[in-house]
Image: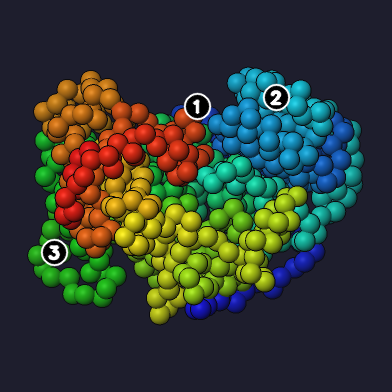
Amino acid sequence: MIEFSTPAIVPADPEANVADLLVERVKATPDRPLFGIPEGDGWRDVTAAEFERQVIALAKGFVVAGVQPGEKIGFLAKTTYQWTLIDFALFYAGAIMVPVYETSSPAQIQWILSDSGAVGLITESAAHAESFQTVADELPLIRTVWRMDEDAVASLSAQGADVADDEIERRRGLAKGADIATLIYTSGSTGRPKGCVLTHSNFVELSRNAAEALSEIVHQPGASTVLFITTAHVFARFMSVLYIHAGVKTGHEPNTKNLVKTLGSFQPTLLLAVPRVFEKVYNSAEQKTEGEGKGRIFRAAAKTAIEHSRRLQDGDKIGLGLRLRFSLFDRLVYSKLRALMGGRVTYAVSGSAPLGPRLGHFFHSLGIKILEGYGLTETTAPASVNLPGKIKVGTVGPALPGIGLRVADDGEIQVKGVNVFREYWKNPDATAEAFDGEWFRTGDLGSFDDDGYLTITGRKKEIIVTAGGKNVAPAALEDPIRANPIVGQVVVVGDQKPFISALVTLDPEMLPAWLATHGESADLTLEQAAKNLTVRAEVQRAIDEANSRVSRAESIRKFTILGTEWTEATGHLTPKLSIKRAEIIKDFAHEIEDIYAAPVSTTNISVAG
């Protein structure tokens, strides 16, 4: 068993709660812009002091509405400024938020609200309210529903005008470090979501220590960011708290289709994203240049960028030829991509899934250092992250201060420290199963290098064991295939089967442009494209590339391209766009059986099924 621990930088304060982080920020820099709110074609600043005034006014409204300290309030909304405003208003009122993904089905809403014991619900839109109404009869504890689209925030703030400041200060200080700060439900990729009890200390101690470890990023002059991944997920929720603690100016963009425009106007210095976002940026740029007849230039630029970054990381000499090529492509390609992302981004934090060395090295050469990290809902998000002064592309970095990581004898990653959750809500059996003493069993597999930098190698429960007894980690094959611009998602199968195979879906956004630049009709449906020989050859190429990285016994021998999408709506992706492997294998059992119905010669090259 190998263990690496990083001592805490900031002494623990068991009396502190999340609200204290805002109080401290206001005392330190009351006039610093803490948020930007869209206004016309620009952004209106909200200072730390003004934000707290709005928080207190809204908290008073919750008091008048009858919300008691310790009560749980469900929240169903997109990522906006109001999301964080409501979050901190509930903290100041002494209440506990239970976030619900805004894409959740009525059944999911019913389960989370009933299991948590929520007594109120805040919704953003009429559609959200309608989803709730379909299950309202099954939720007798819900006594109040507030609708943001009916000006609930302004109305509550006005109604609380007569509540004394002392009452809010009293409520704000009730919670101590060990008390529950929020109840966040897992995304449900393996069954019914479980409620994770995250404490005030989880947020406070992790924020204070992470800010010191990442000081170069969050404390750089004019530090700013745009949040566009859902704040209902622990990753963005924690970062939003960290940004308030560190004084990072934050804008919000709930519609990712507007992201390029938003980045251009807000011009952030820091981005927070999941790997799929970086894949989309890369693939979109590749397809755009292909459409302009400059695809060869882009591919050469990408190859140069990756080689340049690898040599820098490995400490190898960069020859004159590579320097000249890099300088040329910086003018022709890299500078344009930097401008597309606002022109000021120097760092990005990536989490929730493996990024892959190719993208990490590519963006590094653009002047954007992607700090890949690792964490789960149960670890209040980050347990490890690459550090600004020492990035190892392909790893998820060392343990953050105050956190210990170890890899058990069976390869499982385990975590202890300031970020580890208290328990699963009302589920002592699951809690007991999740811990080995004080160490949380993540279910993920990994390995360390000599510096304690962690590499994720797969999911313990997802390991495929073929009929021949070979253990195969699906992620090692799936990640490089998914990087192909026309691939939407991929699931590798083969448990107790004679060979490994794959189900592949196509990306409906990228497909039309790709088809047009490859001599095919851009109007093909997904079902038609799945049978198209040119498309199948491209998917074959992606699979052959992935096969080249593994042994013969681990390689994909057959694959099927499906004429459908996997989405949240179909029940095959979680809100953070992770695949629900069990659901996919169940729903596409017939397609999987068809793959294995006919014999196949066992070569290292896959055969399209």
Between 106 and 122, the residue placed more toward the observer is 106
Question: Mark 1 highlights which residue?
Answer: 40
Instruction: Return the x and y of residue 500 as percentages of the image width and height.
Output: 29, 51
Instruction: Estimate the x, y position of residue 480 in percent, counting from the top left.
Output: 29, 52
526 w.r.t. 242: above or below: above
Measuring 33% from the left and 39% from the top, which residue is drawn there?
593
Which disc is residue 102 wearing?
none
Bin the neighbour count of mark 1 within 10 Å (Cα to Cα): few under 14, some 14-19, many 20 and up. few
For disc 2, the marked residue is 135
Q: Is residue 15 left or right of residue 448?
A: right
For this rendering, which residue is in front, 136 or 265?
136
For the residue carrying disc 2, how many other residues have a C-alpha within 10 Å: few (<14), some (14-19), or many (20+)? some
- At label 1, the amino acid type is Gly
Q: Nearer the viewer, residue 379 or 9?
A: 379
Q: Is residue 12 above or below residue 87?
A: below
Label 3, on which residue?
322
Location of residue 569 in the rendering, given as x and y in whole percent from the top left corner: 49, 29
Q: Residue at x 68, y 47 (%)?
A: 195
Q: Looking at the image, tell me whether mark 1 or mark 2 is earlier in sequence order.
A: 1
Q: Tell me residue 542's x, y (percent).
A: 22, 47
Q: Nearer the viewer, mark 1 or mark 2?
A: 2
Number of the front mark, 1 or 3:
3
Place residue 540 in its image quadrant. Answer: top left
Q: Secondary structure at mark 2?
A: loop
Task: Quote the CA–CA distance across marks 3 and 2.
Answer: 62 Å
Kindly state the secondary structure of the residue where label 3 is placed: helix
Question: Looking at the image, is mark 1 or mark 3 earlier in the sequence?
Answer: 1
| Left or right of 87 on screen, residue 271 | left
